[in-house]
Amino acid sequence: MTLVEKILAAHTDRKEVSPGEFVNVTVDLILANDITAPIAIKEFQRIGVSKVFDPKKIVMVADHFVPNKDIASAEQAKLMRDFCRQHETLHFDVGQMGIEHVLLPEQGLVLPGDVVIGADSHTCTYGALGAFATGMGSTDIAAAMATGDIWMKVPPTIKLVYHGSLRKWVGGKDLILYTIGDIGIDGALYSAMEFAGKVVDTLSMDGRFTMANMAIEAGAKAGIFRVDNKTQLYIKSRVERPYNVYEPDNDAEYSQVIEYDVSDIEPQVALPHSPANAKPISQVGDVEIDQAVIGSCTNGRLEDLRIAAQVLKGRAVHPRVRCIIIPGTQQIYLDALTGGIIETFIKAGAVVSTPTCGPCLGGYMGVLAAGECCISTTNRNFVGRMGSPKSEVYLASPAVAAASAVMGRITSPDEISG
Amino acid sequence: MKGKVHKYGADVNTDVIIPARYLSLSEPAELAEHCMEDIDKDFLKTVQPGDIMMATTNFGCGSSREHAPLAIKASGISCVIAKSFARIFFRNAINIGLPLLECEEAVDKTEAGDILEVDLSSGKIKNLTSGIEFTARPYPDFMAELISTGGLIEHTKQRLAGRRS
Ligand code: SF4
């Protein structure tokens, strides 16, 4: 069995599972946010049970439109807050909250071998920890909150093996954009992506979270990494409960094995309006930008901010550009503050926000007008994703976004820092 | 069910089905007022109850927002026919009772504005404009059962009742 099959089998009453089978899977953690929870709560109430199956395994995070941007979003956050209080579930509200997919691993809520379902498509992020994590809808979450399990179809696994060594300024974001550019926006539809090879072993946990985060952008059900020393080190200080580390069998069957030599890969940029429109930065041409966004569940971690600060240090954001930087959690915000990174950003003329999804989905704080162009470290650049349907979003790494903020046009960090 | 076809291309994503700026709404009727507005201004002006939405591959890709199938359903659309669906959208639609059919041939041989007649139980799709008939891929047994019990919430209610008895 593959890594994913092993984890799923361990959460069913069977010894083995294979792709295509429908199984009932017990879940270790259920997630919803301020957009998806209101519908989940309504549906949960229709089931007619008085209690959730286990309040310690349900976590709700207010992050999308929070601190609330208007009355409607305030009502949604309140509905969620009231539900969490009544059922005594885990709840991260303003002051403790961060972007859910950055926050949950940081808080030690996800462990290797876990099955996590979330009413948010980027739940797949936790695959970086060797967990099986997948996004679903609100109704699925409602049912799971009542029963503690959920139906799933066992996905086939595509193995992606990365060989070679990475050039300067090339990291997890570039690898995943390159991969999606290669296999397409439905290249892994209904499948799990297992990331492997020497290059991913060298990636930091932050880089792996970035890659797993965007598995959904290729249509995948999950993205997953094997557990190694870096994973163990990451979770060591965070968790108390026991966990299981699974390994794929030597004769595991993959639906596809794709190998890449990444030694020559340049920083990647995904052009509007698809994450699969990835191009090497040297082929992007002359694109002037109005805004640069550095943050989100893809690239709002400390390493991302450090890289952006490295590029922005002693430089100024171009006068035409609004540069918005959003640390993923309170802890990252604090670490960036004490490490002097926030000071670098402010001196460069960037704005720094409290953790939130904000502009990533065109919610608030950085919404684009018609005709405007933004470079962003987020994960989607669909029509209207960040505001006006006539605006454009280019996706890239924090290094490229920061360099572009300085130059006022999309550029490689090589151009400004040699 | 019988209705006129509204046809789209590949990778119709949830951000265009219902843009995030409306996600502080959760009433289906309110969501429906903005369904598809970023890619098809005419949709809301022309959609009639019972109409059918059609697209090529990977329909519903992107976010997990259940607001997307809810908006489509509340706009009056009776079912969506596509060559393939994105995974989360597929689950959500089945869970809330918006029927989806996968049928490549029907998509290739149907024009926008054609009138289709669909029989969900047999998967038969008849194009009344051209007279051609198609058969959609059948649902796996498990999913057919889920649909026939009335969606996931009903299914869960019955399971829990079974556990108690
Ligand atoms: S940061 Fe963006 S992609 Fe991530 S959870 Fe928030 S809205 Fe979704």
Image (tube, coloured by chain):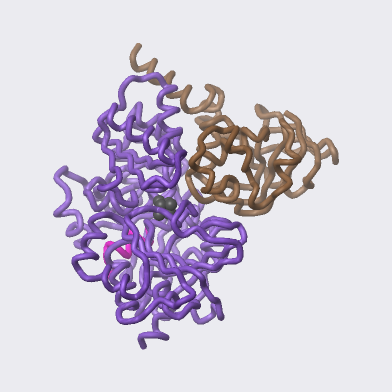
Residue nearest the observer in this picture, B103 or A214? A214
Q: Residue at x 54, y 68 (%)?
A: A373
From the rendered image, report the letter of the chain displayed in purple.
A
Q: Is residue A55 magenta?
A: no
Q: Residue at x 19, y 66 (%)?
A: A338
* Residue A131 at x, y percent in the picture: 30, 49
Residue B4 lies, with reference to residue A217, above or below; the image says above
Kindly report the secondary structure that dominates the magenta region of the rendered protein: helix
User: Which span is picked out in magenta?
Assistant: A202-212
**Image x and y of residue A236, in percent:** 15, 54
What percent of the width, then of the height, locates residue A117? 37, 41
Q: Quarter of the image for the C terminus of chain A: give it.
A: bottom left
Along the viewing direction, whichever of A157 and A415 lies nearer the viewer: A415
Q: Which chain is brown?
A: B
Residue A11 sits above or below residue A244 on the image: above
What x and y, as percent, mark residue A276?
53, 64
